[in-house]
Image (cartoon, grey):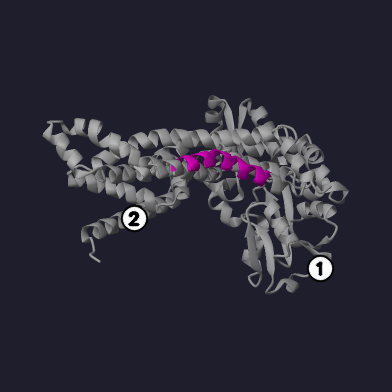
Amino acid sequence: MAHSGISVLFEGTNFVRLLGGLWTAVWIAALSLVFGLILGTIFGLLRTMRNRLIRFILLLYLEFFRIVPTIVLLFLVYYILPRQFNINMPATWMAVLAFTLWVAAEFSDIVRGAIESVPQHQRESGLALGLTQWQLFRYVLLPQAFRLELPATINLATRVIKTTSLLMTISIMDVINVGQQIVEANNQSHPTGVFWVYGLIFILYFIVDYPLSVWAKHLTAKQKEI
Amino acid sequence: MKFNWKKIIKTAIATVSVASLVATSVVQTTTTTTANAATNSSSVQAIKKRGVLKVAVFGDLPPYGWVNKNGKRVGYDVALARRMAKDLGVKIKFVQVNANNRVDTLNSNKADIVLANFTVTSARKKVVDFAKPYMKVSVGVVSPKKKAITKVSQLKGKKVIVTKGTTAENYFTQHQKSVTLLKFDSKTQQFNALKNNRAAALADDNSYLYAWVKKNPKYTVGIKSIGPKQYISPAVKKGNKSLLKWTNQEITKLNKEDFFTKDYNKELKPYFGSEVKPSDIVITSNK
């Protein structure tokens, strides 16, 4: 039978388990994005301030998370933190922590760039109207920066979703890990199952990431029109 | 082009500080890996109090530790794990590991005990404590029938496929230095590599290879046993005397009631067929 491998996907609860794995990956990515974007906005604002010390510390923070590969971050939070500081949380929450810090770092740079590219006269007009620093951010800079940072943010989101494939290295049952289980369990009876399982995972990631990608492209095109 | 020196210096400082941070954490981890009695979160008492035994198992290694089509964890190791939790009177929680992160999972308290086809070696004895063995294995070498490898000397200068962290990898790295190793992460990958002629042969536990050649008649286990016989044991964190003692007593008890032979017949026999006998795998001597 040439196509016997595809039946692997529909045996028992295999398909549901793969979707469950995808759900694990998606909620970890989504939660990390929510926390990371909030934290990143704050960091980004602070980085446009004049205080050199704050700017320097945040630059260190950004460079740390930009240089260290995500897989090393995951190992740090999953294996090193519990051992050194006796913090023992479930793997999924440690993953959310690592991803949040990473997203915050990347996003702070996006926010900083966007705020700095808001035309200078906007800031000056705001100050001339007597707005406080906070009001200036809230009503003048952030709304204008928001439009500028949107495509880069969506791009970051797709990267986070793709990076969830590293979660299997810290024993989280993400879609790749479940796929691996199914492949190995059926290897003897369905040697071609590996193709179908990874094929399905490819499609699942595509379904999640492609709409985001299209949206980002659409927004970029719209910006050029303006 | 103008250089922004301030920025360059800042980045350099950032890089250095990151490097030192990582370096110190690595140094620290190599020094503090023993469980002391006062804070041992994996002692028998602590497990009973918690009501859950955390066991590190494989999720992708049939027939030892894998997940069946209904999503249930099964296998020779898993059956032992479930029995141990039952005898402790606690629930079980599985932590899925791969061959590489078994030691770290113990050291970072993610699991109380490893039951993941863990072969006893002198290097591993330095970082974890092994209980009494519950299984024995030898390394075998499988090759295509047309170009059968029957002696180790035939492998000189050739490539051999192994899975990372296995006994086979260990043996070839230590004793057969003239052989080039091609390392993979899982059984599927290694067997696919052999089928694609990436190497002259593949080395793995011989019991597993017997099972595989039955389904793949173009190949043969040319070298049935190579190197010393090796043992598979439960492992606990270094210094966890309480759980080690309990595990040893448990294995002695299970041996008396022939648990492992029954476990073999249920989980391993369907894979290995009649060529392999329970006595090739199960240890019956330490009753």
Image marks 1 and 2: residues in contact by CB distance under 8 Å = no
Q: A170 or B227: nearer the eye?
A: A170
Q: Is residue B114 visible?
A: no
Looking at the image, residue B190 lies above or below residue B271 = below
What secondary structure characterizes most of the magenta part? Answer: helix
Q: Crowding at label 2, few (<14), some or many (≥20) Cα neighbours within 10 Å?
A: few
Name the residue rendered at 65%, 34% in the picture. A17
Residue located beneath label 1 in the image:
B148
Pinpoint the chain carrying mark 2.
B
Residue located beneath label 2 in the image:
B20
- Give how far apart the Cα atoms at labels 1 and 2 are: 51 Å
Expressed as whole percent of the image width and height from the top left, the position of residue B187 reads 69, 52
Q: Crowding at label 1, few (<14), some or many (≥20) Cα neighbours within 10 Å?
A: some
| Left or right: residue B217 compared with residue A177 | right
* Magenta highlight on residue A207: yes
Image: magenta residue range: A197-216
Pinpoint the chain carrying mark 1.
B
Name the residue rendered at 50%, 45% in the picture. A163
Expressed as whole percent of the image width and height from the top left, the position of residue B135 reads 72, 47
Using the rendered view, name the quadrant where residue B155 is placed.
bottom right
| Left or right: residue B106 compared with residue B209 | left
Give the amino acid at mark 1: Ala
Q: Earlier in the sequence, mark 1 or mark 2?
A: 2
Q: B279 or A76: nearer the eye?
A: A76
